[in-house]
Image (spheres, grey):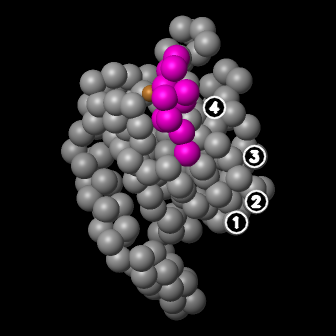
Amino acid sequence: MSNKKRLTVVLTAVAGLSMFLVACSSSDEETPAATATTEAAAATAAAEGTAAAPAAAANAAIEFADIKYSVTALTATAGQPLEIAMTNAGVLEHDFTIDKIEGEATVDGKSAESGDWDVHVSLPAGGAATLVLTPTKAGTYEFYCSVLGHKEAGMKGTLTVQ
Ligand SMILES: [Cu+2]
């Protein structure tokens, strides 16, 4: 793995925003019905002609540590955005990489594509970013940290697109 690739997308945290996103995501995890309720509310608002936020995204959060992810299974729905709040709580640089996946991926509003990877989000220690991933094809995709040796050490997981 060349240094060039690893350095392509190094993100700087907007700490306040990231903490906010993490807080939101955490509460969603504790109440699984929250997302469905939000979507139902959005649908109702749309039906009534009220200005609703564009396509409410499902939420998830993942924390990078030395050397593992806090979550090793993520689920998305084809054609729908999944917003993943990412934080690096470790002292090493880590990333979140998916080799090949069809759809769109942005990180803090910019393309998350990098080099040979369709999704690559690299965070320095203490960094944070939000990935919005809209996969278009159902399947099972591996995500992993591309930093040398980290995947082999177990820093990997599975994204299931239904
Ligand atoms: Cu790593």
Image height of 69 relative to 146, above or below = below
Magenta span of residues: 147-157
The amino acid type found where label 2 is placed reads Ala
Among the 4 quarters of the image, the one containing residue 111: top right
Choose the circle earlier in sequence order: 1 or 4. Answer: 4
Among the 4 quarters of the image, the one containing residue 130: top left
Residue 105 falls left or right of residue 38: right
Real-space CA distance between mark 4 and mark 3, rounded to the nearest whole angstrom: 11 Å
Contact flag, marks 3 and 2 (Cβ < 8 Å): no
| Residue 54 at x, y percent in the picture | 53, 66
How many numbered marks have been drawn onto this rendered protein structure? 4
Real-space CA distance between mark 1 and mark 4, rounded to the nearest whole angstrom: 22 Å
User: What residue lies at 69% left-to-right and 33% top-to-bottom?
Assistant: 99
Image height of 125 relative to 53, above or below = above
- Camera sees residue 79: no
User: What residue lies at 49% left-to-right and 45% top-to-bottom?
Assistant: 131
Mark 1 highlights which residue?
Answer: 162
Label 1: element kind: loop
Contact flag, marks 2 and 1 (Cβ < 8 Å): yes
The amino acid type found where label 4 is placed reads Glu
The reply to whether the magenta stretch includes residue 19 is no
Where's the C terminus, which quadrant?
Answer: bottom right
The mark closer to the camera, 1 or 4, is 1
- Classify 10 Å Cα crowding around label 3: few (below 14), some (14-19), many (20 and above): few
Choose the circle earlier in sequence order: 1 or 3. Answer: 3
Mark 3 highlights which residue?
Answer: 102
- Classify 10 Å Cα crowding around label 2: few (below 14), some (14-19), many (20 and above): some
The mark closer to the camera, 1 or 3, is 1
Real-space CA distance between mark 2 and mark 1, rounded to the nearest whole angstrom: 5 Å
Label 3: element kind: loop
| Residue 13 at x, y percent in the picture | 31, 33
The amino acid type found where label 3 is placed reads Glu
